[in-house]
Amino acid sequence: MRNANDHRQKRQDVFMQSIEWTANILAFVAAFLLTPEIYARTVHWVVSYTASRYGVTGDALDLVSFVWFVTMALLTFFVSRATLATAIVAAGLAAATRFI
């Protein structure tokens, strides 16, 4: 015998998984589009800062550039995912309260 709460919980799980997947996909797209722009505008400053403050030269600066690119990609993805997941849930709740 199934409990009505089990069915409701399964619907909520499907809804939350859908929100999570939607946020992940949109965050991936945002990271794909925004990472090169952010990187291009900040990498010169980061490399210059690293060279002047830590005395790093040569191939180590290439490593700094690569690490900065990966950092910007991850930061863009996770900030986008958090923002989008929150916005999707808020929009869903606003729509639900309007129709109920």
Image (tube, grey):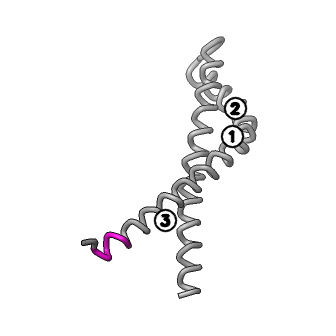
The residue range painted magenta reads 3-7
Which of label 1 and label 2 is nearer to you?
1
Q: Quadrant of residue 50?
A: top right
Determine the residue located farthest toward the left in the rendered image: 1
Residue 4 % position (x, y): 32, 76
Residue 60 % position (x, y): 60, 15
Which of label 1 and label 3 is nearer to you?
3
The residue labelled by disc 3 is 15
The residue labelled by disc 1 is 35
Whether the residues at callouts 1 and 3 have beta carbons within 8 Å, the answer is no
Instruction: Tell me the number on the disc at residue 43.
Output: 2
Quarter holding the N terminus?
bottom left
Whichever of callouts 3 and 2 sits on the residue coming sooner in the sequence is 3
The residue depicted at 58 percent of the width and 25 percent of the height is: 53
The residue depicted at 57 percent of the width and 40 percent of the height is: 74
SS of the residue at dot 1?
helix
Q: Quadrant of residue 72?
A: top right
SS of the residue at dot 3?
helix
Q: CA distance from mark 1 to mark 3?
A: 29 Å
